[in-house]
Image: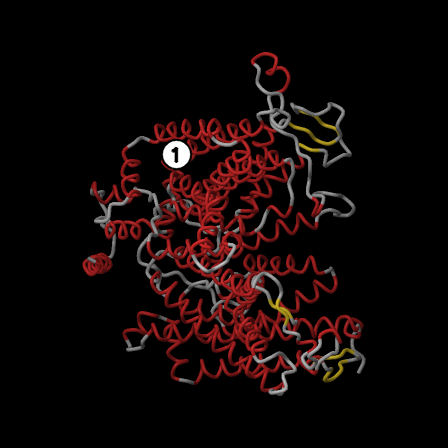
Amino acid sequence: VELPLAFNDQLFIQLTVNGVTLGSLYALIALGYTMVYGILKLLNFAHGDVYMIGAFIGYGVLSGLGGPLSPDLALAPLVLLMFLAAMLGSGLLGVAIERFAYRPLREAPRLAPLISALGVSFFLQNSVLLLFGAQFRSYNSFVLGSSNPELFEPGPLIDPVFKIRGVNVQLIQLLVLLVTVGLCVALTVMVARTRVGKAMRATAFDREGAMMMGIDTDRVIGFTFFIGSVLAGAAGVMFGLLFSQVFHFMGFLAGLKGFTAAVVGGIGSIPGAMLGGLLVGLAEAYASGYFGGRWAELVVFGILIFVLLVRPQGLLGTPELKKV
Amino acid sequence: MTEPRVGHDDWVAEHEERLEERKGLSGLLGRWLAHVPGPAQLAVFAVLAGTLPFWMDRGDLFAYGIFTLLYILLGLGLNVVVGWAGLLDLGYVAFYAIGAYTAGWLASGQFEQVRFHFGSVGISREAQGIHISVWLVLLIAGLLTAVGGILIGLPTLRLRGDYLAIVTLGFGEIIPQFVRNADSIKGFDLTHGTFGISPIDSPGFGEGLNRAVGLPISFAQSFERARLFFWAALVILVITVFCCYRLRDSRLGRAWIAIREDETAAGAMGIPLMRTKTWAYAIGAFFGGVAGAYVASFNSGAFPSQFHFNISIFLLCMVILGGMGSLWGVVIGGAILAWLNVEGLANIGAWVNAHTPLNVEVAKYEFGIYGSIIVLMMLFRPQGLIPERRRKRELEEGTPHGALDDPLYDHRIENEREETR
């Protein structure tokens, strides 16, 4: 089959692959924003930093167990362990943040929890700065497989799995896509089919009403934070595996882009967050490929502002009605 | 979540009532401030601050004193937007940058293609570029930044509060990035990229006034430059505080506060929401622009690395620490944070290292500390150190209140108050 000219371009295919990978991460972050916003109408500014903490927990597990080529562990269980630890740790962190920084302010004017969230974000960043310092910490995912970074030996995670018209897709890129799709499916099923999912939907629809129907809304809110943070933690580990380095400030821009993705897709909408993440990831990849990396962020923010102007409810969102 | 049931004032008043038994220093200061008329407070402040250069070390004055004043100036601008109109602006640094770059364009040799002089002091008549008197540039920068504020505001102010926060955050990131990248727009060097624009002219009074009354020709070339810059900044600050007083009690100021308290109700009362909010943005931006231009002139340069996101947070922290909407709160909050920033953290760090086995550079974690301040203030003292007393007075003097309120709502608030006692 002859594809149109643009699709024959190897650069385009390469950028698309990169964009989809990046977009998966943004989608996972955006899900956390969107779920919390759906229930509390709160913008969880600290969400990007939960993602960063996830990446650092993954790093902690990796270095704690002796690095990628530890003789005691095979690669697959190691990566699995990193994911589990990061997801659990981030999830608990999310619950703690909700409990201590947001819950006391739930009845306060809108600005208060927002400002508190901002403070939490800075607090988390600086805690990591205190513990790990300002330098980049290496996941060595590129050498996951070699104990000696000097050798610069590509590890199994960046082995090409298959080719699309001559462009290699690495194992890690495939892994990111699979994990993201898996988590998204699990989330969708949970929200649509389970009891707790029903409680979440009820709480998002009308918190007071849900409370009167006997739903423990505080627990539901805590659970929502837990799930959102679990997804962010997974995204953090995947960022580390993809780009092989993590640092204390990484959550800031990632959080902003995740938020952009949530808004583009329609905040409050779960499929919207997935779609938005993909779009933002692709936009960033194309922008940096065609215009140069220094314009990539400008393009992403440009999209955010454009969407807010033209369709403030986002692509898949429903416009919000204000009741007095 | 259902909409919060109380506005800022109610919330502050609730907290105040709870804190009534505890009468600390800040309470005393607050009560004192409530009884002294504004202009008198301002005069006391101006005299106290004006004598600072006589007993402060010249180097310290140069390094910290002037910046403290300018941060307070920026904080006052942000206070208009956040404290009064209740619009969370996380990209205030953008206004600061626009002001600084305006000074860079209008009072330096950046545009070497042209030669235009208007009241410039202390530089050769033959110098290329645009050289307008810095005093005038301050005003122009303010106006231009206000226009910038309106341009940013028009599309974004229709959005709900939290979207606004993110969009302004985006602008706060975009503008420094744009400045960094705009060194060759179709071959035209607008901002000189990462190198920034430097040197920028200094303010001064020119040779005529120098000969007549002995005022300095140009601050930067004077031996007393630290003091001159300090006093000039103080004059700008005093004018700003005065303007803020007048603004707060004006029709516009009352409209801002009404919007902050309840946007829907304010709209229903006939306040034009968009126009009022845009004014808040424009006026907040104006002060930011003036401060930016002054900083650029004082530093003799505008560099993209100056306009970091952290400055927006630092300013927000000032406003929150002092008390949102409270003028003197911003001044005191600014002074405390500037001190912390410059000396306090280093001193605390030295103390910690001397008295505990830890060895940390506390100053490195300043933003963690600011973050903690923000959270703790929000949780335990949301009204700030020196709260705005408006609502308090209303409660004491029994302004008609609650006539239109939902009876259930009032009942509930009463119950909550009962419980907290």
Along the line of sight, which residue is nearer the eye, B342 or A177?
B342
On screen, residue B199 versus residue A49, left or right, reads right
| B8 in relation to A190, above or below | above
Most foreground residue, A222 or A107:
A222
Give the crowd class for mark 1: few <14, some 14-19, many >=20 residues within 10 Å: some
Placement of the C terminus of chain B among the 4 image quadrants: bottom left
In the rendered image, the vertical position of residue B16 relative to residue A113, given as above or below: above
Output the chain of dot 1: B
Query: Residue A292 falls in which quadrant of the image?
Result: bottom right
Q: How is the image coloured?
A: secondary structure
Which percent across, then down, holds residue B33?
31, 36
User: For the N terminus of chain B, which image quadrant?
Assistant: bottom left
> Looking at numbered disc 1 in the image, what kind of residue is underneath it?
Tyr
Under circle 1, the secondary element is helix
A163 versus B144 height, above or below: below
Q: Percent from the top left, x then y, of residue A142?
A: 69, 76
What is the quadrant of residue A107 in the picture? Answer: bottom left
Q: Nearer the viewer, residue B46 or B179?
A: B46
Q: Residue at 38% of width from left, 27% of height from top? A: B43
Provide residue A188's location: percent of width, then percent of height.
49, 81
**B131 to the left or right of A37:** right
Q: Name the residue at 40% across, 55% down.
A: A111
Which residue, given by chain and number where applicable, does mark 1 sit on? B245
Q: Position of residue A48 (x, y in %)?
A: 52, 65
Q: Is residue B190 above or below residue A104?
A: above
Residue at x 41%, y 80% (from the top left corner): A197
Residue at the image position 55 percent from the left and 71 percent from the top: A56
